[in-house]
Image (cartoon, helix red, strand yellow):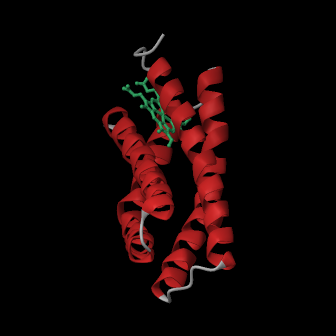
Amino acid sequence: MARRIHPIAGTIGFLTILVFWISTAVSELFGSPATVAAVKQAIPWGFLWLVPALALAGATGFRMAGASTDPLIARKKRRMPIIAANGVLVLLPSAFYLAWLSSQGEFGPLFYSVQAVELACGAVNLALMSLNLRDGLRLAGRLA
Ligand code: HEM
């Protein structure tokens, strides 16, 4: 069961953050303030499936890993707390704050400073998650 759920939950988490990141960048580069505000206010709703998906990916991953000393598994284990801390300490609070600022029509330097931090930390999580995806496919024998 864990073997089935794990890659689905992990891939959903990765794709969700990718969609958040791209829609944020595209709306802020080319969109009107109303479009930016719509994107910023939609993102926190995505946490309703993003947070459970990542929790499931982590829990099933650690369960499957057991006491294994495989270096690929050890690397995946080391990345997960960074992904979680980055999400809980930076990405969730900044997304809620940006949603609130945008709802007030506040698109000044504060908005763009928080936005820059959020995009940078989002990119870090995307990179770490894509490495976990790659190592997962290697572990499952699907990637050389
Ligand atoms: C967001 C983070 C993660 C993502 C996106 C992810 C993704 C994946 C993917 C796509 C697979 C391949 C499964 C298949 O093709 O059948 C996989 C396998 C695996 N993952 Fe993860 N994973 C994540 C986190 C973790 C963590 C934290 C661990 C714990 C060490 C872990 C342990 C494993 C193991 C042991 C396998 C091999 C399963 C097998 O032998 O079939 N993963 N993972």
Residue 51's quadrant in the figure?
bottom left
Q: Residue at x 40, y 52 (%)?
A: 19
Quadrant in which the N terminus appears:
top left
Left or right, residue 2 beside residue 108: left
Is residue 68 visible to the viewer in this orientation of the structure? no
Q: Nearer the viewer, residue 37 or 31?
A: 31
Q: Is residue 26 left or right of residue 12?
A: right
Percent position (x, y) of residue 42?
Answer: 37, 71
In the depicted structure, whether residue 32 falls above or below residue 74: below
Residue lying farthest to the top in this orientation: 144
The residue sitting at 60% across, 34% down in the picture is 76
Q: Position of residue 103 (x, y in %)?
A: 46, 85
Relative height, residue 43 to residue 137 (above, below): below
Q: Quadrant of residue 132?
A: top right
Task: Give x and y (percent) for residue 9.
Answer: 37, 45
What x and y, as percent, mark residue 77?
Answer: 62, 37
Residue at (61% x, 66% y) in the render: 115
So how many labels did they put on this image? 0
Res. 98 image quadrant: bottom right
Picture residue at 51% right of the left edge, 83% below the top = 100
Task: Decide: is 81 above or below 134.
Answer: below
Q: Is residue 129 among what the camera can see?
A: yes
